[in-house]
Image (spheres, rainbow, N blue to C red):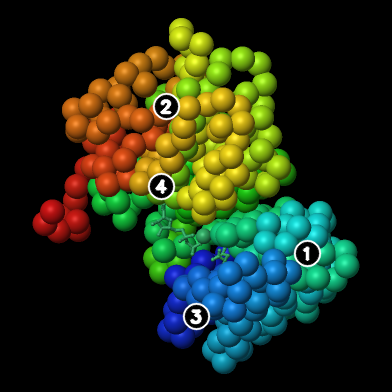
Amino acid sequence: MALIVQKYGGTSVGDADRIRRVAERLIATKKAGHDVVAVISAMAGVTDGLIKLAREMSAQPSERELDLLLATGEQSASALTAMAVNALGGKAVSLSGAAAGIVTDGVHTKAKISHISPRQIQELLAEDFIVIVAGFQGQSPQGAITTLGRGGSDLTAIALAAALKADDCQIFTDVDGVHTCDPRVVPESSKIDEIAYDELLEMAGAGSKVMQSRAVEFAKKFGVGFEVRHSQKELPGTRATEVTPGMEEVVVRGVSLDRNQAKVTICGVPDRPGCAGQIFSALSGVNLSVDMIVQNASSTGTTDLSFTLHKDDFALAEKILGPLVSEIGASGMMATTGVAKLSVVGIGMRSHAGVAARLFASLGEAGVNIQLISTSEIKIAVVIEEGELERAAQATHAAFGLARPRSQEDGPR
Ligand code: ADP
Ligand code: ASP
Ligand code: MG
């Protein structure tokens, strides 16, 4: 007998029929002789709907109230799943994150888990219940409901699997695993059978939202093995693990896309110590995180400094930097939201040369202009015009030979 943590995402519990199918799967796992803890997300669209309503009440709703509001999405989906299991003859009980013993810091909307006391879950498992936990939430030491950032039910599942020393953690979603690129953008993308934590971490951080990056970080830190699988199909998915022999033979594991980008260029920045410090201190002073930063060597005494940040932070960045541009003696600022980021990721890059050349050549052939470039040990990222993202993704995917062979099931193109 094993202890299995299963997480079901929003689409997988998107309506009453789907909730019933999840309930059937939970009962089947229990009948196979396993203890089951299920982590449930809010039904598809519910979190976005609640955020929209909150913004109708206030342009900047209190983060404390927002957490209390958003946590209800996962609570109602969990209660409905427990009802479905019980109606189908199983035995289930649902718990909020707080009741499941998930304690976080007090940073609303992006709280960190500080510890988990799973005593109540263990008692319920001992009484043969299927235990259903509302994802995405916990409770601060002061007793306030907190949430774990968008996509945070993944983190709930991984953290519970670690705390309960589960034998397996299965992340059920609406695709059959982690693909070489978002299958909605590149339909010929292929499912990856096995992926290193570091690769998935880079992919998640670069916009592949199939797993929350904080959840992958947690899994790597605590050595939680997990599998991303399709919730409506009986197929093996993608296993995430530490690096295994042979993994480095694949040069590029996947292509990640991120549309939520904005780009700022401060032109004619005086080439003297302290200017970059002033610019980025002003941004960090209002809690804005930047992503890529590019500055060239200057031959004229001034230089252009560009960086990217999340689209949602764009307006605040423009407001903060406006007065600073003249203060530091720069000549102007250009800022735009119409950009996107494309990244190629793979631990094989550590030992293979020529990845940058192949990426840039394929984008060139597709007529896609590169605006910014940044690299890490296992990733090369470029910023391009948002309207060209799909074309760029398809060209890059093909250039690295990532497409699966087409089968008859695919139907006509
Ligand atoms: P859930 O609600 O189950 O948590 P998400 O919507 O958060 O599901 O994540 C699944 C979605 O992630 C897929 O529908 C797919 O469009 C998107 N996605 C982006 N990149 C990838 C990728 N590389 N592999 C698989 N899915 C991806
Ligand atoms: N419902 C939350 C979100 O939409 C958490 C999750 O789905 O994992 O971000
Ligand atoms: Mg998700």
Q: Residue at x 58, y 85 (%)?
A: 80
Amino acid type of the residue tagged 1 in the rendering: Ile
Q: Tell me if mark 1 has few (under 14), some (14-19) or many (20+) residues whose alpha carbon lies within 10 angstroms of its own.
A: many
Contact (CB < 8 A) between labels 2 and 1? no
Q: Which mark is residue 373?
A: 2
Question: In the figure, is residue 50 to the left or right of 11?
Answer: right
Q: Residues within 10 Å of mark 4 (few under 14, many from 20)?
A: many
**Spatial separation of the CA atoms under disc 4 and disc 2:** 17 Å
Name the residue type under label 4.
Thr
On the image, the x and y values in percent for residue 183 come to 32, 52
Is residue 193 at least partly visible in the picture? no
Q: Which mark is residue 19?
A: 3
Front-most of 47 and 63? 63
| Location of residue 8 by image quarter | bottom right
- Tell me how far mark 3 sits from mark 2, CA to CA: 44 Å
* Ligand 1 quadrant in view: bottom left
Upstream in the sequence, badge 4 or badge 2? Answer: 4
In this figure, which residue is indicated by the disc labeled 4? 337
